[in-house]
Image: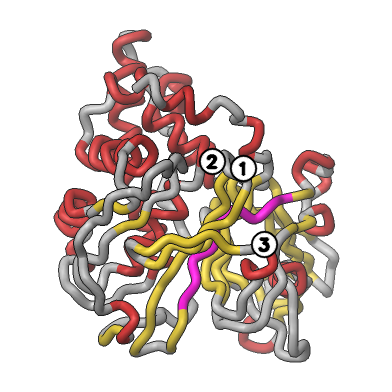
Amino acid sequence: VIFISTTHAAPAPARGRVMDGEKRGFSSAVRPHGWNRAGVCGLDNSGNSCYLNAVLQCLCSTLPLVEHLLSRDTREESKCRVAETFARLLEEMWLGSSSSCAPVEARSVMCSILPQFNNYSQQDAQELLLFLLNALHDDLKKVAAARTRHVTGNRNRAAAAMESTTIVSRLFEGQLGYVTLCMHCDHQTHRTQTFTVLSLPIPTDIIKCSIQDCLSLFFEQTLLTGVEQMLCSVCGLRRETAVLTCLDKPPEILMLHLKRWVDTKHPLLDLSPFLSSAVQNASYSSYRLYAVVNHTGHLNVGHYTALCHSALTRSWHCFDDSAVREVEDRLVQSAHAYVLLYSRRPFQNHSDTNSHLKQF
């Protein structure tokens, strides 16, 4: 599986120079006396790396991913470079004793497998997020393949399916369905497309729009006319075609990428209007925001930060590289949101996360 961003190409922000706010010292600070916030840990800036830090903070706040990568079974079985490096960083962020740490090894591994990021230029956080998840998925597939061969001793179809599924695909992968309708003969076709991130257009006729408005525009029925007409297999000619998009398989973690920045409202999502008839289920309708990658500035100069909700403290924190501060819920809604992560299941169900992780 190659993880893709589905769009109905977004400008890549902040390549090039950095803002003054990113030029700061890189030394780690000792946690204040009494600090006991597992998973709330700043990340030192290693030179124009705010885009990396913001993405890592969001992944660190994805508890099912953290628990899986730090579980004893995964640590014992995983001898793959990306997974091991990421697990060591998560361990330091969740179980370490400092208020910040330096993701030097993580950046080194990232640059070795993703040479396009092997420089000190600012990069696009959404692009990095996709590449990191794909690299982690590929790494974990090797672990799954080795485990399957050990258990089954062969590579039948069922074994191959097990090898292609990882915690990354189980959490982040969804599926869109496209129904096309020939406006001349009413012939219908259906196709599907796997996605990891949905790139949402922004309504131009609303001054203050919500994410729900952006989703409605993304899933709006479109009519293909003129040079965009599709070839109808029944008519044998290009005809005007209506295209209806729906969610055939909603993901556990829904990641949304905004094509530009507006004043948005985004704490809760209702996906029920966009579900296909096969998944009209209440459990798939409501998603709750738990992490945001924010971007300030414009295309050539800018700075990334992250806002993440801690299921353990039940509070939001702003991560500005190594600086961390708690923020009120109302401050999470921002005109600077760039990538948003929503969970279908509340992470509060993992009530024993902290004690569970301390076993490792």
Q: Three-letter amino acid code at disc 1? A: Glu
- Quarter assignment of residue 322: bottom left
197 or 67, which lies in front?
67
Residue bearing mark 1 = 252
**Whole-number angstrom distance, CA of label 2 to CA of label 1:** 5 Å
Q: Secondary structure at mark 3?
A: helix
Q: Secondary structure at mark 1?
A: loop
Q: Tag 2: Cα neighbours inside 10 Å, few (<14), some, or many (≥20)? A: some
Indicate which label's residue lies in the foreground, 1 or 3. Answer: 3
- For the point 49% across and 63% down, which residue is it? 318
Please identify the quadrant where the N terminus is shown.
Answer: top left
Q: Tag 1: Cα neighbours inside 10 Å, few (<14), some, or many (≥20)? A: some
Residue bearing mark 2 = 171
Q: Which residues are magenta?
A: 287-295
Q: Three-letter amino acid code at disc 3? A: Asp
* Horizontal and vertical percent position of residue 282: 84, 41
